[in-house]
Amino acid sequence: MRQRDPAERDALAALHDGDPDAYLAHKRARETLVVHEREDDAVEATLADWNAARRKLGLSGAVMIARDNATRSILNERARALLIAEGSLPVDGVRIADQELRIGDRVIARRNDRHREVDNGTLARIEAIEANTGELTIITDSARRCVLDAAYAAEHLEPAYALTGHGAQGATVEWAGVVGRPSEFGREWAYTALSRARGGTRVHLIAEATPKQRERRQYAPPEPDRTVDEALASMSSAMRRSEREALAVEQLEPITLSGGEGTVARALPLPELSEGVPSARCSIPSRGRPRRHGHRNRIGWRCASSGSALPEAGASGDSSGRADSQPED
């Protein structure tokens, strides 16, 4: 393990082996796990912690980690605004496709490309940008200089002040701040996100209901807000849940099968299912199950039996805002 603190290593080992209570007790005793009633408060606290850490350690030494791409985008935007306001980044950048990049930006490459000598997950700093062509020169964390054309930057280069757990997989930093709701800390994701830092890892837990739960308040009695103890108990329960063993389906629009024999219902991300949303079910034609070819069959749905899982939403730098999931490091 990369952690220098023996107590942190022991707590993470227990988490890895399926005992999250030891880890949670350790973090609470060290006052490095904070429960927030509101999501906005958790996001702001994560950003403030990151800002203090990066001032001390530099941009490559600190990272924020979120489960979903929507939260990651918010953290990246606010981090960049802080850096512009203090003069660490220039006010004006160079627009490439739908994003504006600046000299000094911390970025992550999201696709392997042997011709450009970058891998999916390469972390770097932008050293130069050619304003006329959009060509970028980056310096990776391993001190390699790479030149990327505008086409690659437009499709596969993203800000890296905040990452999803998938994006952070394999990375090592000095400090990490992890933010999410209790149900989002599935066993594999939690271990990956919480084990990136050699030094400190600070956890900001959101007790507030999910957006889906808030929508249901319009036509159903509202659920009471969680207490601190309830939020921690829900987090502990999620950390015992292996997402590798859960039935995994792609998020699809309802599909009508040929001949009107049945439909495949819209699937929900696993974290929302664990928050009490009724699980989506598939109805299969009565003539028997369709043949499968790998994980995909002829009617267009995907599934995996216990012990094997399909790629989760949010993998490979997906910017759709769906839940991020990946195996442990």
Image (cartoon, rainbow, N blue to C red):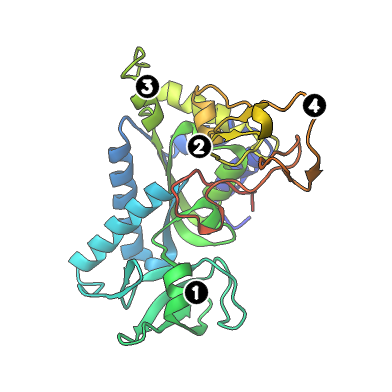
Q: CA distance from mark 2 to mark 4?
A: 38 Å
**Figure quadrant of the N terminus:** bottom right
Residue placed under numbered mark 3 in the picture: 216
Mark 2: few, some, or many residues within 10 Å (few <14, many ≥20)?
many
Which of marks 2 and 1 precedes in the sequence? 1
Q: Amino acid at mark 2?
A: Glu
Going by the image, does 162 lie left or right of 19?
left
Q: Tell me the element at label 2.
A: helix
Residue placed under numbered mark 2 in the picture: 184
Which of marks 4 and 2 precedes in the sequence? 2
Which of marks 4 and 1 precedes in the sequence? 1
Mark 1: few, some, or many residues within 10 Å (few <14, many ≥20)?
few
Going by the image, does 290 lie left or right of 204?
right
Residue placed under numbered mark 4 in the picture: 287
Q: Could you tell me residue 191's position as x and y percent?
A: 59, 45
Furthest residue toward top: 221
Q: What residue sits 37% from the left and 21% below the top?
A: 216
Which of marks 3 and 1 precedes in the sequence? 1
Mark number displayed over residue 296: none
Q: CA distance from mark 1 to mark 4?
A: 56 Å
Furthest residue toward front: 259
Residue placed under numbered mark 1 in the picture: 141
Q: What residue sits 59% from the left and 60% below the top?
A: 170
Residue 294 visible from this viewpoint: yes
Q: CA distance from mark 1 to mark 2?
A: 29 Å
Q: Is residue 73 above or below residue 182?
A: below
Q: Tell me the element at label 4.
A: loop
